[in-house]
Amino acid sequence: MVYYECVLTAKNTTSFSALTNLVKEVALKVVESGGIVRGVENHGIRTLPHRFKAKHPDREGNRYFEKGRFFSIYYDCNPKTMLSIESVLSKKEEVLRQTHLKVRNKLWYVNIDKEEKNPYIQRVLAMEKAETQK
C-alpha cells in the first residue's frame, strides 16, 4: 500500500456537515478497499493565490471564489483506490481543487531489497569500506 496525502480546496461557503460527509465518504472508500485512514487535518479558510472558478455556482450564485477552505486527508491504500477517490472528488461540487501527493518519510527509504536506493545502507557500506582501506 502507498501512503497518500490528499490536499483539498473546498468552497468557503460550504457547510460543515457537507464537508464532514465528504471526508466520511473518502474514508469509507479507503477502508472498504482495505486501506487505512491515518488522519484528517483542517488548515482553515485562506485567501487563494488567484480566484478559482467552480464548475457550478453555489446557492447565492457565486461562481468565482477568492477564499477557500483547505484540508488534508492522510491515508494508505492501493493506487486503484486513489484513482477512484480522485474521480469521486472531481464530481463533488464543493471541491474547487484537489491534489494527491505520495508522502515520503524516513521509513520509505528503509528497503533492504534495493541497497543502491537505501541511503542508510549506503552510509554503512561507505563506513565499512573506509575501515578496510586503513
Image (cartoon, rainbow, N blue to C red):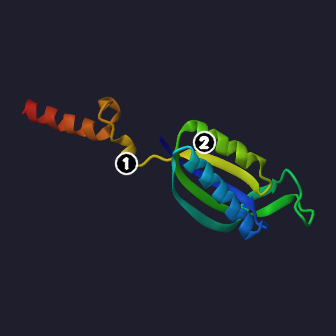
Q: Name the quadrant containing residue 86.
A: top right
Q: Position of residue 53 (x, y in %)?
A: 83, 53
Q: State left or right for residue 125 relative to residue 102.
A: left
Q: State left or right for residue 18 relative to residue 123.
A: right
> What residue type is disc 2 on?
Met
Q: Position of residue 67 (x, y in %)?
A: 76, 65
Residue 76 or residue 115, whichever sits in front: 76
Proximity of marks 1 and 2: CB atoms separated by less than 8 Å:
no
In the image, what residue occupies the spot 57% across and 63% down?
41
Q: Name the quadrant containing residue 130.
A: top left
Nearer to us of marks 1 and 2 is 2
Which residue is label 1 attached to?
Answer: 106
Disc 1 versus disc 2: distance between alpha carbons?
Answer: 22 Å
Residue furthest out toward the right: 61
Q: Earlier in the sequence, mark 1 or mark 2?
A: 2
Which residue is label 2 attached to?
Answer: 82
Q: State left or right for residue 114 relative to residue 101.
A: left
Dot 1 surroundings within 10 Å: few (below 14), some, or many (20 or more)?
A: few
In the image, what residue occupies the spot 76% across and 54% down?
96
Q: Is residue 133 visible?
A: yes
Q: Which mark is residue 11?
A: none
Residue 40 or residue 55, whichever sits in front: 40
Whether 62 is drawn above or below 129: the answer is below
Q: Position of residue 10 (x, y in %)?
A: 73, 59
Residue 21 or residue 90, whichever sits in front: 21
> What residue type is disc 1 on?
Lys
Whether 114 is drawn above or below 87: the answer is above
